Image (tube, grey):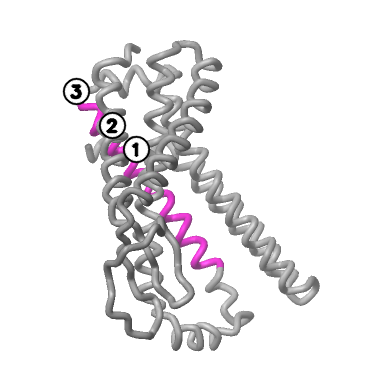
Amino acid sequence: MGNLIKYELKGNFKIFIGLFIITCLVNLGLYSRVDVWPSAAVYSLVLVVISIMCVMVLVFNINSFSKELYEDRGYLTFTLPVSGNKIIGSKTIAALIWFTAAGILTALTILFFKGKVDWSIISEINKHVNLPLVITMSIIAVIVNALQLLFTIYFVITASKVAVKKKKIGKFLGFVLFIALNAGIGYVAHLITKLIPYTFSVDLSRQTHNALVYTSDAFLRISQNGLFEMNIAVIIYTILITIGLFIGTGYLIDNKIDM
């Protein structure tokens, strides 16, 4: 699978590097306006640019997988003596690498203008909120959500290819299936919170809370007393759905895709 990852990274290297360079240049141009334009406006525009970059990273990864199914490059990939799960795994790892690079670039963009930021605010916040724990929980949440999103997209693209051979109709079907699948997954998660109302909480504040598991219909939220609450059954359900989408996509590639 290592060769597949290298192939994937090499194939999209110029696109992503170009995107990152453009992002850096635009943000540098915006930072040069700090003393000219209102600071709030500059930082807002920087966040917009970063958001656009992240969206484009997702779009490029989706497009890369779509090309494998609908264009000639797929003949090479799907005729290799590797399983569908390895193909999906390699594309997912490559996508996570590009998302990580985008995250590092985002952090560097903020730190680059360190002199313009009042970093004492962070120290003040850390007195009331456990920032290392918040960052750790945020990273875990981002990875889990990124995996579920990628596997959902890979699954609907593959399923639509299996159902309809024509590219335009297949993509439209994939879009409809994506909305329907997410709506279904979200609705089932909502029902689970009502049927199994047991919540696991993590203390994000500097206070001490004794109860870690208690009855609550919370799905995912941060309470007023600094607790990050997650429904236990929904956590398990999300993990199973993510694994199921991964296995399902691999199965369709192995048994239903005919290039």
Pointer 3 residue: 81
Q: Is residue 212 in sight in this rendering?
A: yes
In this view, 217 is above or below 157? below
Secondary structure at badge 2 equals: helix
In this view, 258 is above or below 227? above
Mark 3 in CB contact with mark 1 (< 8 angstroms)? no
Pointer 2 residue: 87
Magenta span covers which residues? 82-109
Of residues 41 and 135, which is closer to you in this image?
135
- Give the residue displayed 29% in from the left and 21% down from the top: 252
Query: Badge 1: few (under 14), some or many (20 or more) residues near its Cα, within 10 Å?
Result: many
Pointer 1 residue: 91
Report the Cα–Cα distance between label 3 and label 1: 16 Å
Q: Position of residue 179 (x, y in %)?
A: 50, 33
Q: Earlier in the sequence, mark 3 or mark 1?
A: 3
- Could you tell whether 132 is left or right of 28 in the image? left
